[in-house]
Image (spheres, rainbow, N blue to C red):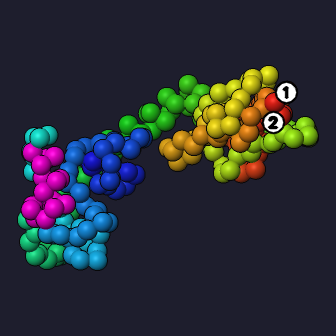
Amino acid sequence: SVGIGGAYLCVYGMEGPGGYQFVGRTTQVWSPWQQRGAFEPGSPWLLRFFDRISWYPVDAEELLELRADLISGRFVPRIEEGSFSLAEYEAFLAGDAESIAAFRSRQQAAFAAERAAWEAAGEFARAEAASAPTAPPAEVTVPPGGRLIEAEFAASVWQVNVKPGDDVTTGQPLLALEAMKMESRLHAPMDGVVAEVLTRPGDQVEAGTALVVLAPAAH
């Protein structure tokens, strides 16, 4: 998939990573297992510094065929040698300077208006409150034979799947953390009973933050 990632136009190695603006789909630009056709042996990447890309439309079925053919070496994208002239590029920018300035002016005005709307709606105050890490409890007591479940990295608590008093079995999901658009589930390391839940969805936690206390199962 092709999308906008910050200031870059990015080609991702999957159909749709979350949180990005997509503008299209294309063939692979990364082939770690084998390099054939347009891929140079020993170099899993297709693109090089200063490469310029031209796009053309194909339908969905043809795209799938091109992807299979690219990996097998049957399809080689058209690659042409060229040169980049800084003088010509600067002349191009100078020729369009007026329209570029007008666009940037509209862009900044729209950004300022949207930011003002966010501020009026209290979005910044909510974001600041949500970003503050949860204060750890003053003292956590783990019963004999029990286990303390801690955050392994800084993250946001996405889901809490248990409550105090719940019986759990080894491998059962206890809660889910989210960081960098990736979800990580924490599972029960033993059969037992949930003694305490020390967090809630939306909390920001640091590595080592106590999340759940398990007590041994009653016999």
Dominant secondary-structure state across the stretch colored magenta: helix
Residue found 51% across the figure and 45% down from its top:
182
Residue 51, percent from left and from top? 21, 69
Give the residue type that dot 2 points to.
Val
Magenta stretch holds residue 75: yes
Q: Is residue 172 left or right of residue 23?
A: right
Magenta stretch holds residue 52: no
The residue pinned by badge 1 equals 218
Judged by depth in the image, the label closer to the viewer, 1 or 2, is 1
Residue 37, percent from left and from top? 14, 69
The residue pinned by badge 2 equals 213
Give the residue type that dot 1 points to.
Ala
Q: Hey, which quadrant is residue 109 in on the image?
A: top left
| Position of 177 relative to 47 (above/below) | above
Q: Which residues are magenta?
A: 62-77
Q: Residue 128 or 180: which is nearer the viewer?
A: 180
Task: Indicate the quadrant containing the C terminus: top left, top right, bottom left or bottom right.
Answer: top right
| Position of 71 relative to 160 (above/below) | below
For residue 56, the mark is none
Residue found 38% across the figure and 37% down from its top:
110
